[in-house]
Image (cartoon, rainbow, N blue to C red):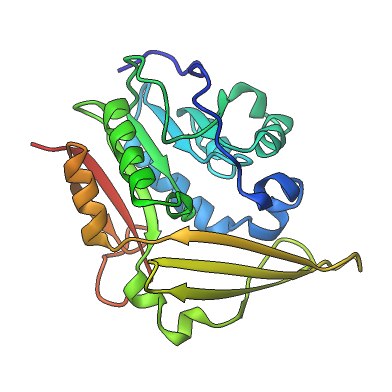
Amino acid sequence: MSASLEAPEPPEPAPAAPYARRFADRYDRWFGKESLTADTVDFLARLAGSGTALELELGVGTGRIALPLARRGVGVAGVDASPEMAAQLAAKPGGDRIPVTVGDFTRLPADGRTVDVVFVAGGTFFELPTQEDQSRCFRHAAGLVGADGAFVLDAIVPEVLVGAEWSGGRVVPNRGDDLVVRYRRFDRAAQRYHSHYAITPGDGSGSVHLHVSFRYAGVGELDLMARAAGLELRERYGSWGGSPFRDGCPYHVSVYRAAR
């Protein structure tokens, strides 16, 4: 494995999602999931083990996961399409010590480096807009982790979330006094879903409408993409806390390694 995590040469530019550019300074306040973050960091720290493990986060954002991982002693770097998000990370205590490459994380340069773990969390994988983009991400991750590492992602289970219980509007807990309401709309024919957030700031400033589009895939399709990239599923859980993946779980955490 590589002995350091210097940032690679920038990959090809990728347009960042509008929310990542316009609301980077408020992203943590609206979407900082503290309990989920703790479970995610615990999971990834256990996967890294001890010693000089190196991890690369795709879609590192403001460092919600990368920073606490680094405080655990895990060597971590990130890639993100938004320079605004990267700037928020760099401004936090310890953030300037996390190498971040601004660019498209599906087009990382093939420079021979390897890391122990590549991960993408918070549903970010489905922000990749096409099956080819998602397949390319698997291929690049497979090259980065080599024969001994792991590629980890979390994702919704569309067969569960397409139901009315999960598709309607619901209040999203946040760190401040803002009111954040999310509404999901599924387009089954296009294999896409759209998350709309209506946000009323607690300070009385103007309301915000935030829209994020996703291209979803079921676990079978994800496993097939992995196989095509030379990876295979080794572990799948129903949460970052490690609960079993069973019928009715709204999302999964999947660990892929080099196919035997």
Residue 17 falls left or right of residue 57: right
Where on the picture, by quarter, is residue 157? bottom left
Whether residue 88 is situated above or below residue 112 in the rendered picture: below
The total number of labels drawn is 0
Image quarter of the N terminus? top left
Residue 215 locus on image (x, y percent): 42, 59
Q: In the image shown, does 147 or 104 lie closer to the viewer?
A: 104
Q: In the image shown, does 179 or 240 lie closer to the viewer?
A: 179
Whether residue 150 is situated above or below residue 134 in the rendered picture: above
The residue furthest front is: 189
Residue 114 locus on image (x, y percent): 32, 21
Q: In the image shown, does 251 or 46 lie closer to the viewer?
A: 251
The residue furthest bottom is: 164
The residue located at (49%, 79%) in the rendering is 167
The residue located at (29%, 63%) in the rendering is 218
Whether residue 75 is situated above or below residue 72 in the rendered picture: above
The residue furthest right is: 204
Q: Is residue 20 visible?
A: yes
Q: Is residue 49 visible?
A: no
Residue 113 locus on image (x, y percent): 35, 17
Image quarter of the C terminus? top left
Where on the picture, by quarter, is residue 251? bottom left
The residue located at (43%, 65%) in the rendering is 192
The residue located at (43%, 55%) in the rendering is 126
Whether residue 76 is situated above or below residue 194 in the rendered picture: above
Residue 45 falls left or right of residue 254: right
Residue 144 falls left or right of residue 7: left
